């Protein structure tokens, strides 16, 4: 199994594209509730593929782990259902005859993986597939891997959601982790796609039509569902305005992240299913949105989380905070140290470390001994010396708005470097100080990469998001250019070789950058980006309805197609194709459900009509990026070739 990457690795060679886009050797780790056994999940690669679970005796970490072979498949995650039973998520891409599974679409495989959960004891034996008694679901349902709650009214059972072939609806199942037997606990409505449970009792039901979500609430002891509110489900599959992040010791009270009326920053608060009221503030920060929390198996709050540039925690127990600071210091305070599991007594933690020059590794920390020990690395060959560093930039925009950007620098010292500007998607998302294989791929070519948390990005409060409303193409684009000006002012950029590349909203920003400052960029890459904002609004109205929450959100975010028509035309790259000077590469998945593929087709046709240089790639069996490994490789190589040619 993969070794831990050394911080002093001897190999200084730039990583290859294949190394950077490859699947990890280790993908997850978990600690048993009693803290006695750590499970690590991975895949041995090179030659025959073999998924394995490594089981460590935490009292004797120097001893070799027990290796439990799983077989020829990909794996996703691992978790303990109890001290006796371990769950392993399998991603099956072959049937029993070794043939590739999936739905054929225009000669390609549309749906490749079948998700299943395997249960075993802590010695790796007595293995059983969950839903073992449900032949119809095992045969026809591709996803039998959604755990809703590890607590039920039976200590041997957990709660899972799955589409029922018999009921033709989503059902909530009670599943025995010893036998695999699944029994229906609750049948959803026609549009139900999720439940929120506490202590094994469903207290919320999520019904969805398109991107509009209706939330129903039922307190413990009640028999009927009460409608609470409608929300928009965003591109990250979360609900705008409310995020359920944990349970409490009160079975009717949840922890949520929300921004209260009249406040700027998102806080962790309580939500009471009995009264349908958002309650007291549990945690907040003075200058950043809270993002989540960690709750142990007994619904006790361990810590709340937020992002400055790196992941940060506010611990309920100050003693645990001291230990966490020590772990961060071990990594030079240069990594995100995510707590991914904790024992019931809070004495043993499993953490995942990652950073710009650290591709990911798993560790176990023992508070009693104050000792950190390695479990393994996600990518053993990607040592620190092979990866590019990242610099945090603080600056004020031309209109005085404080802003953050990140500059990735290739290893080594040389002359002025080419640079790729890479706006993030969303736009209500953000970049962070972390490992990113696409950034490292660009840096491996010797190029610097600039990311900007422009106005409209999340994490900085409601006012910062609102500052981007109806400013696609002008103020949000100005922020990117202002960050670029700061970097150029450092004197390390080859101004004759600057490109711009992005995905989703970032793809739109790449196209708009080529319009707004046509002499600045030598190459443009837009992946799944919008090109005509009037079409964007029309497609949403067509898909979701003119009175939908989703359409109202985009109308407020981008602009009103009637009142703001002229501004929307001016901010639509496809309507300004004549102004392009740099060669453009467009890439899109034909089945993209977030940004319609028509957006890239419209842009392609407009550039061709204007006699501009444009290359186009359409992946027929892909949706919104990220794509499957083989198509992701095609996308990456085409992007690199396009920029190399322009920089030559």
Image (cartoon, rainbow, N blue to C red):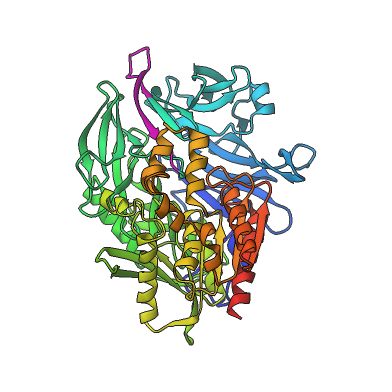
Q: Going by the image, does 385 lie left or right of 116?
A: left
Q: Position of residue 546 (x, y in %)?
A: 44, 33
- Tell me if residue 227 is in the magenta stretch: yes
Q: Nearer the viewer, residue 514 or 138?
A: 514
Q: Going by the image, does 575 lie left or right of 348?
A: right
Occupied quadrant, residue 371? bottom left
Q: How many marks?
A: 0
In the displayed orientation, state which residue is furthest to the bottom.
415
As displayed, is residue 336 above or below residue 133?
below
* Residue 85 in sight in this render: no
Q: Nearer the viewer, residue 436 or 43?
A: 436
Image point (60%, 20%), residue name: 168
* Residue 557 in sight in this render: yes
Q: Position of residue 367 (x, y in %)?
A: 32, 51
> The magenta stretch spans which residues?
216-234
Q: Tell me the quarter of the image containing the N terminus.
A: bottom right
In the displayed orientation, state which residue is furthest to the right.
97
Q: Going by the image, does 542 lie left or right of 556?
A: right
Occupied quadrant, residue 395? bottom left
As displayed, is residue 349 above or below residue 199?
below
Image point (52%, 68%), residue name: 579
Q: Tell me the quarter of the image containing the C terminus.
A: bottom right
As displayed, is residue 418 above or below residue 354?
below
- Tell me if residue 542 is in the magenta stretch: no
Q: Position of residue 88 (x, y in %)?
A: 56, 39
Occupied quadrant, residue 99? top right
Q: Position of residue 620 (x, y in %)?
A: 69, 48
């Amino acid at each position: 199994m993969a070794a831990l990457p050394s911080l002093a690795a001897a190999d200084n060679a730039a990583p290859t594209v294949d190394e950077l886009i490859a699947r990890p050797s280790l993908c997850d780790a978990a600690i048993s509730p009693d803290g006695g056994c750590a499970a690590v999940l991975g895949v041995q690669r090179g030659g025959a593929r073999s998924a394995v679970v490594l089981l460590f005796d935490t009292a004797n970490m120097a001893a070799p782990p027990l290796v439990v072979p799983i077989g020829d498949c990909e794996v996703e995650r691992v978790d303990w259902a109890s001290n006796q039973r371990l769950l392993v998520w399998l991603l099956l891409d072959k049937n029993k005859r070794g043939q590739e599974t999936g739905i054929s679409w225009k000669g390609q495989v549309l749906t490749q993986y079948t998700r299943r959960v395997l249960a075993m004891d802590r010695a790796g034996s007595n293995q059983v597939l969950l839903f073992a008694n449900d032949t119809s679901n095992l045969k026809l349902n591709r996803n039998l891997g959604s755990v809703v709650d590890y607590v039920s009214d039976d200590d041997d059972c957990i709660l899972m959601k799955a589409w029922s072939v018999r009921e033709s609806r989503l059902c909530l199942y009670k599943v025995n982790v010893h036998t695999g037997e699944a029994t229906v606990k609750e049948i959803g409505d026609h549009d139900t796609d999720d439940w929120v449970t506490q202590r094994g009792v469903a207290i919320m039901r999520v019904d969805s039509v398109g991107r509009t979500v209706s939330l129903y609430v039922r307190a413990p002891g009640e028999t009927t569902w009460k409608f609470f509110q409608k929300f928009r489900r965003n591109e990250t599959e979360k609900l705008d305005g409310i995020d359920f992040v944990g349970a409490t010791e009160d079975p009717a009270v949840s922890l949520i992240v929300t921004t209260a009326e009249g406040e700027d920053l998102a806080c962790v608060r309580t939500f009471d299913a009995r009264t349908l009221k958002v309650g007291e503030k549990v945690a907040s920060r003075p200058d950043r949105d809270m993002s989540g929390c960690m709750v142990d198996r007994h619904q006790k709050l361990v810590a709340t989380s937020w992002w400055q540039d790196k992941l940060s925690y506010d611990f309920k127990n100050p003693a645990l905070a001291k230990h966490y600071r020590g772990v961060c210091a071990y990594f030079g305070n240069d990594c995100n140290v995510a707590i991914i599991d904790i024992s019931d007594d809070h004495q043993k933690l499993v953490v995942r470390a990652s950073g710009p020059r650290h591709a990911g590794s798993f560790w176990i920390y023992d508070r009693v001994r104050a000792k950190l020990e390695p479990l393994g690395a996600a990518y053993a060959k990607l040592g620190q010396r092979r990866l590019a560093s990242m610099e945090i930039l603080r600056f004020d925009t031309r209109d005085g708005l404080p802003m953050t950007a990140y500059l990735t620098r290739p290893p080594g010292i040389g002359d002025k470097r080419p640079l790729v500007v890479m706006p993030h998607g969303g736009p209500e998302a953000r970049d962070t100080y972390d490992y990113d294989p696409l950034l490292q791929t660009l840096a491996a070519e010797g190029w610097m990469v600039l990311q900007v948390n422009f106005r409209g990005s999340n994490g900085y409060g409601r006012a910062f998001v609102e500052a981007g409303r109806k400013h696609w193409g002008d103020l949000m684009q100005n922020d990117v250019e202002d960050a670029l000006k700061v970097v150029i002012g450092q004197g390390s950029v080859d101004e004759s070789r600057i490109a711009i590349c992005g995905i989703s909203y970032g793809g739109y920003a790449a196209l708009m950058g080529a319009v707004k400052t046509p002499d600045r960029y030598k190459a443009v890459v837009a992946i799944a980006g919008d090109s005509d904002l009037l079409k964007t609004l029309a497609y949403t109205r067509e898909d979701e309805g003119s009175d939908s929450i989703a359409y109202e959100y985009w109308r407020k975010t981008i602009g009103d197609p009637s009142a703001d028509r002229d501004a929307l035309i001016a901010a639509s790259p496809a309507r300004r194709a004549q102004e392009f000077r740099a060669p453009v590469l467009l890439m899109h998945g034909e089945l993209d459900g977030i940004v319609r593929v028509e957006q890239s087709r419209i842009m392609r046709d407009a550039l061709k009509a204007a006699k501009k240089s444009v290359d186009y790639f359409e992946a027929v069996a892909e949706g919104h990026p990220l794509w499957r490994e083989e198509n992701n490789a095609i996308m990456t190589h085409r992007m690199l070739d396009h920029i190399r040619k322009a920089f030559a």
